[in-house]
Image (cartoon, helix red, strand yellow):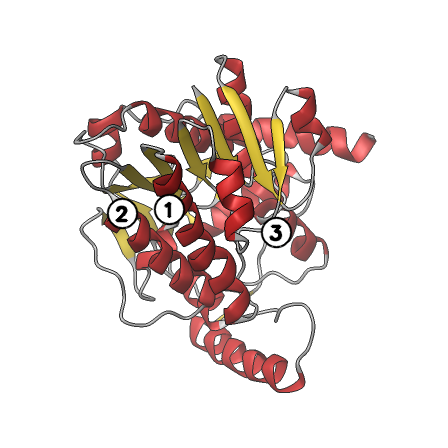
């Protein structure tokens, strides 16, 4: 088949592209800039913005399936930027699929779309969207996810996947942030309560996208559905952080502050950044304070049942691979 991967040059997008090429599929990538590494894999590239409907339509034309991975992520920024990329961009992808008669769409969502600030312990896909969001990323991703699910009908099959905290070699988001702040001594445990969280190693996340795609068809079990994805290995949040720090040769986090203080600090910093239009992002936000002081792990039963998802790389093996990759980066 011929697949379009939006954000094909990104962390998850590139991993999906590699798996598709390894099994012989034709691949086209759509992103803002060209990526030489993809060209070496024999990937066709279309350059453009998700907010450009014509560019998206041109990229979709001639494909059999679309993996819509591209998004504006982050815990801070302007609402208009998140809306333009995540909501409007997703609408353009759906419209382009309809226009060109594409039958299948796999959408990368996030568990944060149902996070209401409280513990999520073993929850399944029946958990509702919250009435209020603490950040624009989950707010706009939730709206985009609903557009995707509502688009599923007798002529167009869609599925939304919610991988949680993707990490591994070549990660350009989670791991670098942890290592950067760890190196500066800027990390603090939030409280003493042991909250469990689950993550997903990059190879497992990419494989799950292909598995879902292969089971996606008109009227199939996965059509019109949403699925949580993770390792299936809940661990204490700060054990996860410390294992990543250790992989990067950094000491563990030992100092603590209360979750309540972190939340109030986040609220104050957000106001300051907005008032003075400061660049970058606050050291703490209300969303991050809630994320780091609550449990986040999920029931994977639906993904296992409907498209055979099972993590191939364990957390321990993933950490070993991350350590090896980080060591190579340091020596090169």
In which image quadrant can residue 319 be found? Answer: top right
Whether residue 31 is visible: yes
Residue indicated by mark 2: 151
Residue 105 spot, x, y in % from top left: 36, 37
Which residue sits at x=42%, y=58%? 87
**Which secondary structure lies at badge 3?**
helix
Marked residue nearer the N-terminal end (3 or 1): 1
Residue 134 spot, x, y in % from top left: 41, 71
The answer to whether mark 1 and mark 2 are in CB contact below 8 A is yes
Farthest residue to the right: give it: 332
Q: The C terminus appears in which quarter of the rendering?
A: top right
Residue indicated by mark 3: 178
Q: Residues within 10 Å of mark 1 (few under 14, many from 20)?
A: many
**Does residue 155 appear to the left or right of 165 in the view shown?**
left
Residue 119 spot, x, y in % from top left: 30, 59
Q: CA distance from mark 3 to mark 1?
A: 35 Å
Q: Which mark identifies residue 94?
A: 1
Which residue sits at x=76%, y=33%? 329
**Which secondary structure lies at badge 1?**
helix
**Which secondary structure lies at badge 2?**
helix
Residue 297 spot, x, y in % from top left: 32, 47
Between label 3 and label 1, give the one nearer the viewer. 1
In which image quadrant can residue 279 be found? Answer: bottom right
């Amino acid at each position: 088949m011929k697949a379009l991967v939006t954000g094909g040059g990104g962390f998850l997008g590139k991993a999906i592209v590699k798996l598709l090429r390894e099994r012989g599929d034709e691949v086209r990538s759509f992103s803002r800039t060209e990526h030489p590494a993809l060209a070496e894999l024999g990937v066709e590239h279309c350059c453009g913005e998700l907010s450009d409907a014509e560019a998206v339509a041109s990229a979709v034309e001639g494909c059999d399936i679309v993996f819509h991975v591209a998004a504006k992520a982050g815990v801070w920024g302007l609402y208009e930027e998140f809306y333009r990329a995540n909501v409007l961009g997703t609408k353009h992808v759906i419209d382009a699929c309809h226009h060109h008669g594409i039958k299948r769409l796999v959408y990368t969502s996030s568990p944060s779309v149902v996070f209401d600030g409280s513990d999520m312990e073993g929850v399944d896909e029946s958990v509702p969207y919250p009435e209020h969001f603490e950040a624009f990323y989950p707010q706009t991703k939730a709206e985009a996810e609903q557009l995707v699910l509502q688009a599923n009908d007798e002529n167009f099959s869609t599925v939304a996947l919610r991988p949680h905290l993707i990490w591994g070699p070549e990660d350009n988001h989670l791991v670098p942030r942890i290592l950067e702040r760890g190196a500066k001594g800027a990390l603090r445990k939030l409280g003493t309560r042991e909250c469990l969280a689950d993550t997903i190693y990059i190879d497992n996340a990419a494989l799950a996208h292909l598995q879902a795609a292969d089971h996606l068809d008109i009227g199939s079990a996965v059509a019109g559905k949403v699925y949580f994805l993770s390792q299936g290995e809940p661990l204490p949040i700060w054990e996860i952080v410390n294992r990543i720090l250790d992989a990067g040769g950094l000491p563990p986090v030992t100092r603590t502050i209360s979750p309540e203080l972190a939340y109030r600090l986040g609220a104050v910093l957000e106001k300051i950044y907005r008032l003075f239009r400061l660049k970058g992002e606050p050291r703490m936000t209300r969303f991050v304070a809630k994320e780091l002081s609550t449990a986040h792990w999920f029931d994977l039963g639906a993904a296992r049942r409907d498209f055979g998802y099972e993590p191939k790389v364990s957390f321990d093996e993933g950490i070993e691979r991350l350590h090896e990759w980080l060591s190579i980066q340091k020596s090169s």
